[in-house]
Amino acid sequence: MRLDASDGGPSGAGLPARLVWVCVALAAGVAAIVLGAATWALARSPGPVPTAVGLALVCAAAASVAITAGAAVCVHRLARAHVRTTVGASPAAGQPVVGQQVEVFVGLARRLQGLVHREIQLLDVLEAQVEDPDLLKGLFQVDHLATRIRRYAENLAVVGGAVLRRQWSRPLPLVEVLRSAIAEVEQYARVRVVPPVEGTVRGHAGADVVHLLAELVENATAFAPPHTEVTVRARRVALGVAVEVDDRGLGMPHPEQDRVNALLADPGRVDVGDLLRDGRIGAWVVSALARRHGITVKLQSNVYGGLQAVVILPTPLLGDLAPGQPPAVEAGRMPPRGEPTGTATSSAPVAGASPSPVGARHHPPAPPPALTRVASSATAPALRDGAAVGQVPREAGPAGPLLPRRTRQAHLAAPLGRSRPGSVNQRAGDHDPMLMADFLRGASSGSGEPPAPRAVPRH
Amino acid sequence: MTSRSAHRETWLDEAAGRLVRPYTVSAGRTRPTTAMDLLSWVVATGVRPRGRLEPDHDMALGLCGVATTVAEVAARMRLPAAVTKVVLSDLVAVGAVLTRPPSPAADPTDRSILEKLLVGLQQRL
């Protein structure tokens, strides 16, 4: 599929090498932008504040370069390690070594996360101080690059099975999650969130959902004409919330769609080596993130002739947020509760450690063919939860934030039992799709026709 | 070398940083279309623009219900002043907000007042 813009190479070794060069070029770009901005600031106004800002910019540039280069090397090695695990001639013999390597890469990814987190904190301080539009524009470009680097560093850690370092103890408004995902995309200005977006995402999954959506939105912007916009919508469905990412590009042939959907539903069936050669790392990352949280992702053609990515965030992933509660930025001051004990989790002795059971956990034996089922029905997440396929562990670690255990159909009772969030806080005269659905259902039942299908718990 | 625990700590809630980066709020724009400074007054005209507003525009419009200053809006929205000006100038452009130059008592050229305000803003942000 088209996910991930990197070009495919004739051989497996070509792609990672090219990836490294892309990252090095990116680093050079960051350096050029920031150094230019800093020099300009220093030359323009010799006062004490601009000087400090300039120096800080230089520091930020240095951090960006270091982080990008480090990330490039990390991605390169992790990708090779995964190729070896899945397509190697004797995976059983090579596994302990590869397991250790993955642990090392995850450890490096965590360091990258630490650095980029500090960089973004620094940028927050600078952005609050700078009023000059030109200087701020430069800062925003650095901020944007840093945010994208953070996305890849966090993806790298997640793919390696680590627990997320950014966590929230409260549900995050879905609209903030969508906007955060858009912020991680190169051409973010072309993406529009179509209101209304209601509902929340549970805090433990926030960053993963953001990155998953960012991959899909990035793909949509990369393969649609530059003057077209990409729209993101969210709506309540029986299984949870559906997020739809629509582009106005040329779409994708059906056989190709089927192949990508098969990968998204069950990455265990797909050869990672082929993916790397074709430059489809993005699809694999989406698949890994989706499986981690029981999210269903599917691509289909849309009415514009382009591609629509549908993401179903299942009900257990959605949080409750009373209407009128302050948004995420304001609510961030609540006292932490249930602090995740990330220190006890998988991410491991970084170097020189003996092979650990944690490392072995990352590489279950190849799945039997019976487990590779098409996950297109409503029970798809449950099937995936049960299938121990692929290279990514389902859970972050013994002390990581655990997903709630689900029982078949039981999750439908909760949303149906309480008042429908879609109709709360709705202004009179606004379009309410749920109201229309209720009306149609009532009309059809009154006219003696069989009622429209509706997801209700079976008793 | 940094201690190992430093690479394992998690950042919870406030420590995790803001979810929506400021450049997203203004779609990367940093130059407002309407001239205003920190002490300019802004007040909602009561005109509600067609369609739904972006969340930040909605919030800014709500804060302008009573006459207030750009600096106050920026502090309450916890956004950089430049970004707040862009958001407010969008609202001015659609007729939802009126802006007035600072009252004569607060001379905009008075650097000390601006600096005090900046310090105050930084403390709040």
Image (cartoon, rainbow, N blue to C red):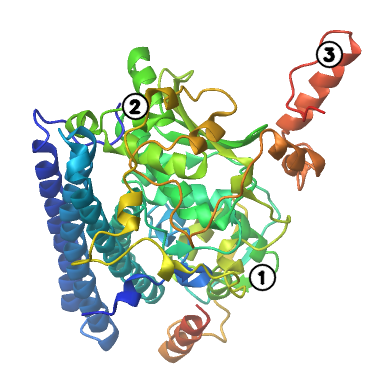
Instruction: Read off the residue under disc 1.
Output: B67
Q: Quarter-wise, where is residue A87 in the image?
A: top left
Q: Are marks 2 and 1 in contact (CB under 8 Å)?
A: no
Tell me, yes or no, whether dots 1 and 3 are on the same chain. Answer: no
Is A320 positioned to the left or the right of A55 in the image? Answer: right
Q: Quarter-wise, where is residue A144 in the image?
A: bottom left
Residue A308: x %, y % from top left: 45, 26
Q: What amino acid is found at the position of numbered circle 1 in the picture? A: Ala
Q: Nearer the viewer, mark 2 or mark 1?
A: 2
Instruction: Read off the residue under disc 2.
Output: A269
Is A226 positioned to the left or the right of B74 in the image? Answer: left
Q: Nearer the viewer, mark 1 or mark 3?
A: 3
Tell me, yes or no, whether dots 3 and 2 are on the same chain. Answer: yes
Please tell me whether residue A436 is drawn above or below residue A122 in the rendered image: above
Does the image show residue A230? yes
Disc 2 and disc 1: Cα gap in Å?
Answer: 61 Å
Q: Which chain contains the residue that carries disc 1?
A: B
Q: Which chain contains the residue that carries disc 2?
A: A
Instruction: Read off the residue under disc 3.
Output: A444
Q: Secondary structure at mark 3?
A: helix
Q: What amino acid is found at the position of numbered circle 3 in the picture? A: Ser
Please tell me whether residue A459 is drawn above or below residue B115 in the rendered image: above
Locate the C terminus of chain A and report the quarter of the image it occupies.
top right
Q: Residues within 10 Å of mark 3 (few under 14, many from 20)?
A: some
Does the image show residue A160? no
Q: Name the residue nearer the viewer: A160 or A280.
A: A160
Tell me, yes or no, whether dots 2 and 1 are on the same chain. Answer: no
